[in-house]
Image: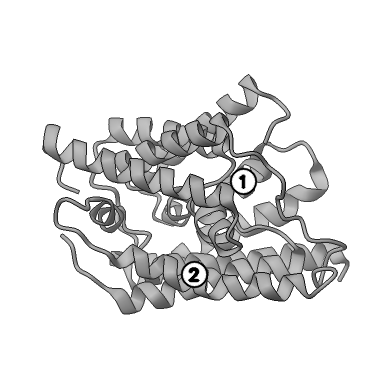
Amino acid sequence: MSDFTPVSGLVGGALIGVAASLLLLGSGRIAGVSGIAAGALFSREGGERWWRLAFLAGLIGAGLPFVVFAPEAIGPSPRPLLWLALAGLLVGVGTRLGGGCTSGHGVCGVSRLSPRSLVATALFVGTGMLTVSLLRIFAGAAP
Amino acid sequence: MSPSRQRTALALAAGAVFGVGLGVSGMAKPGKVLAFLDVGGDWDPTLLFVMGGAVGVHFWAYRCMRRRSAPRFAERFSVPAGMPIDARLGLGAVLFGVGWGLGGYCPGPAFISLATLGLPVLVFVGAMLAGMLLVRAVSPGSE
């Protein structure tokens, strides 16, 4: 399962950093996907909706060339559907309560050394690791 | 182009670059993400390099930002500041971490995976949006 790919990881990560920097220096906005999604779909402030919808469209559209030319780059989750439904609910509630996810806290917040984002990132990476370990030990779920 | 259109176009480009970064880095493969979270098992440290690449680039964007009075296409920078480190942040990050470890998806990779129209990601994203709406319904006005 585990194939360590540091170079493509670093290159892909740098692209993520470039994208977040474009948004910050161009529009003054944080590239936090959970906040952008919630704002795009549920916000009532109309004027701020379009750039968020555009970001989501770009993000989803970026998947299309992978689907056609490198389908292995976007794998499905190995988890059962019921787990995924519960996981989605937890991620939706958790990111709104915590005000961010892997991108908003993990990349943008950590980059500006925000104490709040450093705490959030340590907590979600820590509990993510704990969850995967417990599931492997007690539910026999190989990641 | 009006500034609002410029921001929309920029967000589309940023979303696309962000998505390509996710696809290249391996973050769009939940199995690989779960292997990163599985520190006690067959650990795949790739995600450390993804984060390193992203933060390494974006850190410089923040330094740039501090030398400027406004972003290129907007009147001001909208960067969160002065938000508390409180129980809400902690609870949110923990719930998000559990959901991340349960499904292997965080919001960014989930959105790019929508391009596959696969059932697992549709279930996850549907539940995630429901979770976001739930927070909105319980504590309206808070972001």
Q: Residue at x 67, y 45 (%)?
A: A40
Q: Position of residue B136 (x, y in %)?
A: 63, 27
| Three-letter amino acid code at the position of disc 1 | Gly
Dot 2: chain letter = B
| Looking at the image, residue A63 lies above or below residue A47 | below
**C-alpha distance separating marks 2 and 1:** 19 Å
Name the residue tied to disc 2: B54
| Looking at the image, residue A122 lies above or below residue A2 | above
Of marks 2 and 1, the one in the foreground: 2
Visible in this render: residue B50? yes
Visible in this render: residue A33? no
Q: In the image shown, does A57 or B49 lie closer to the viewer?
A: B49
- Quarter of the image for the N terminus of chain B: give it: bottom right
- Quarter of the image for the C terminus of chain B: give it: top right
Q: Residue at x 59, y 39 (%)?
A: B85
Q: Residue at x 29, y 48 (%)?
A: A77
Name the residue tied to disc 1: A35
Quadrant assignment, res A135: top left
Tag 2, which secondary structure?
A: helix
